[in-house]
Amino acid sequence: MLWAGMKLVSRYSDPSAMRLNLDEASHRIVAGSIQSAAPAACRFTTASYCLDVDQAEAVESTARSRSYRPSTPCFELTVSRSEQKRPDVRYLLSKRPIALLSLVPRPAVLFTAGAVSGAIGKTLTAPLDRVKLLLQTSGGLQKGAVKQAVRQGGVWQALVAIGRTEGIKGYWKGNLPQILRVVPYSATQLYSYEVLKKRFKNEMGELSLSARLAAGGLAGMTATLVTYPLDTLRLRIAVDPSMRSIRGASAALFREGSYNAFFRGLTASLIGIAPYMALELATYDLMPSEVPGFAKGFTAALFATSLCYPLDTVRRQIQLQSAGALGARQAFHNIIQRDGVPGLYKGFLPNALKNLPNKGIKLATFDTAKDMLGRANHAYDDELVKWQRALSIKHSSSGLT
């Protein structure tokens, strides 16, 4: 390739037929297609510069190696970059800590939020809840001052009698099984409601009033069915002074009716909880967003409780029967004959004082958790864009992209 006028001549062919321009010969060497009549060694006619077959192959191999880029380094670079496509925990912790919440699965966040909100609300209002249960069951199996105070129908008198008879711990008697029940109950109820609302949306992504009510009712029934034995235990401990532990109450119920004793009044409970939760949750969702969460929960619970409280009173009467043979209709007639219509609302005042703040706390806490999850997802999306933009600039400046 040193002289422009050189001729490439084959040893076994006519030299006049094998005149090639050096540029064309070089092109064919690079392309790997040296064409001649026979695969013989090649030689330039001017001077003693000869190109044998081994040298031709070496030139061809060198040319190909220059035009070929190994795949291994490129593969390693791609893997390295794919591992850093998303910001890690340390980066999010230093930049936007709230974005870490988006790394937790949404069902886990909602389930935990429902459990924690329910436990907080129930613990703070446990004293009023016990008074409500005693009023609903006309004192239950209590005796002495507590029984007398409950029969007089006074909330304050009952609170004072419990404190004098059982001490400060008496206000939270039965609260442990209550917490054991309310944690899975609240978590199942609120999470199921969110899932069912998504399932019941139409093709346009809208949720009708009837679908919203159905979602609330089914969520309440699901949670009640899952945790009903714990609710029966809580009632027995709260109204029976001889019961000091969950184990003792469980043994007593098992002696009275085996496993069926833990599900007394389940039908009445499901019938009562479905309209109650449908009204409460739908009312809460449909109230203006400008209203504070606690006020929304308080109002929604007041509306639902006012309409559904008689069914809850009937359920408590059935749960207390040791024989378990009392039906919902018979229990309803017994209450009406003994106490009239006001008997269906026994314990309504302490229930309202306990339940309304409890619902306000629970629903507001759950709503806050959902808002935090939305803000966390938004923050994570922002940091993801910044992270990928920084990576793009870095690789562009280093010539890797």
Image (cartoon, helix red, strand yellow):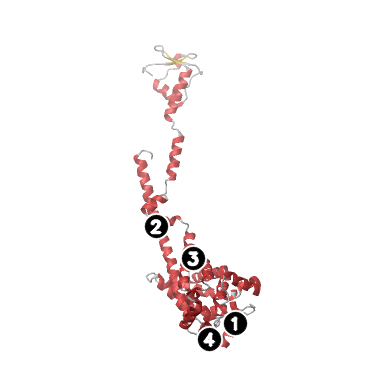
Amino acid residing under circle 2: Ile
N-terminal of the two: label 4 or label 1? 1
Point out the tag, 2 or 3, that comes first from the N-terminus. 2
Q: Quadrant of residue 264?
A: bottom right
- Kindly indicate whether the residue at mark 1 contacts the one at mark 3 (C-beta within 8 angstroms): no
In 3D space, how far apart are the residues under numbered discs 2 and 1 (Cα atoms)?
52 Å
Question: Callout 1: helix, strand or loop?
Answer: helix
Residue 341: which disc? 4
Helix, strand or loop status at disc 4: helix
In which quadrant of the rendered image does the C terminus lie?
Answer: top left
Structural crowding at the residue carrying mark 2, measured as other residues with C-alpha within 10 Å and reported as few (<14), some (14–19) or many (≥20): some
Q: Which mark is residue 331?
A: 1
Q: Is residue 185 above or below residue 163?
A: above
Determine which residue is flagged by label 3: 115
Identify the amino acid type marked 4: Val
Cα distance between the residues tagged 4 and 1: 13 Å
Task: Tell me which amino acid carries mark 1.
Answer: Ala
- Give the crowd class for mark 3: few <14, some 14-19, many >=20 residues within 10 Å: many
**Which badge, 2 or 1, comes first in the chain's sequence?**
2
Three-letter code, disc 3: Ala
Residue 303: image location, x then y, percent: 46, 77
**Where does label 2 land, which residue?**
98
